[in-house]
Each structure stands twice: as structure tokens, then as C-alpha cells.
Amino acid sequence: VIVTPARVLVVAPSDFAADIVCDRLARAGVKPDVMTRINSTRRLTTSVMPSVLAYCNTDRASGAFVLPPSEVVQGFACVVCTCATAGTLVTLGIPAGHFTHIVADESSQAVEPETLIALTLAGPATRVVLAGDPCQLGAVLRSPVANTLGLATSLQERLMARPVYSEARSIV
């Protein structure tokens, strides 16, 4: 049996939620050489929890967030970012299937297209976990047109409405 080390992408719909995940993993003992927190280059470093800054990539001269090269990102066992920033990983050239696991935390608060950005990095063997409570705060969408087209529904909520999940709930 060949065991491949896990490479996990954790996404959340907001910077705050992604920071919380990073902070909790750090408190659990995950070190900065194992995990990185990828931020938008437009985000201010002052908006990041101090415990999370050690996991972020910043330019020493300006203090601004920078995107590490693809090979650096691929060297981490765990990458944490927002759903939208996951698109940057695609732009960096991270291949689909690089991550063995993709975990979307608070996925019921993300609109479906947002979650799908991260899922473009999934390959045939990637395990995907959508975590969140669809009975709490739902996805927020400001466009009435997108709302009428059904885009205000989260991917998790849409999948849970499928018959396979209805049957599973009646067994429990």
C-alpha cells in the first residue's frame, strides 16, 4: 500500500472565517512550515488576527500581502484561503488534483459559484467536504437578477435538497 501525504485546501466565504480556521489549526499545533494562509493582495495586514500573520506571505519592505509562487504553495500540506482567493491558486498554476482534500467551511454561507471556484482545483481522487449549517445564516447575494436565477442558494443547500440526502435523513 502506498500512502500519499494529504494536501488539504481549506476555503471559507470570508476572510474572517478563513482566519478563524487558520487560527484554530495553529492552536492545534499546525506550524507555519506546514500551513499557509493565502490572502488577497488588496487586503490590509492590519485586518488579520496577529496569531494568523505568521502563516501569511508578506513583502518585508512594504508589509503588503504577496502571492507566493506555485511551487511554494504546493510545498504546504495545508492551504487556507477564501473561496474567491482560491481562484488565484488556479492563476498561479496549481493543477487540478493537487489537493487530496478540499474542505469548504461555512459552505452554506457561500453562494454556489463562490464554492465552485475552489472545486475547480479538485481532481478525480480529491475528497470534498462541505461543512456548515444551512439552517443558520445563508448565502448573501445583492443582485436581484442573480437572485431570480437561483444563485442565492449555496451549493451545500442545493445538494441537501436532492433526494439522496432526504432519504439519508429519514434513516437517522
Image: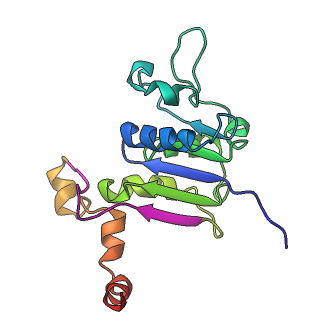
Q: Is residue 76 above or below residue 49?
A: below
Is 60 one of the magenta-colored residues? no
Residue 27 quadrant:
top right
Residue 54, position as x, y percentages in the image: 58, 26
Q: Which residues are magenta?
A: 127-141
Q: Residue at x 58, y 61 (%)?
A: 122
The foreground one among 20 and 130 is 20
Magenta span has 131?
yes
47 lies left or right of 88? left
* Vertical comparison of 63 with 92: above or below: above
- Quadrant position of the N terminus in the picture: bottom right
Decide if residue 33 is on the left or right side of residue 106: right
Q: Quadrant of residue 57?
A: top right
Q: How is the image coloured?
A: rainbow
Indicate whether 154 appears above or below 58. below
**Front one among 34 and 9:** 34
Give whichever of 101, 86 is nearer the camera.
Answer: 101
From where the camera sits, is residue 41 visible?
A: no
At horizontal 51% and vertical 40% (from top left) the residue drawn is: 22
The foreground one among 57 and 111 is 57
Q: Main secondary structure of the magenta part?
A: loop
Image coords of residue 17 (percent x, y)? 38, 43
Q: Say if residue 63 shows up in the picture.
A: yes
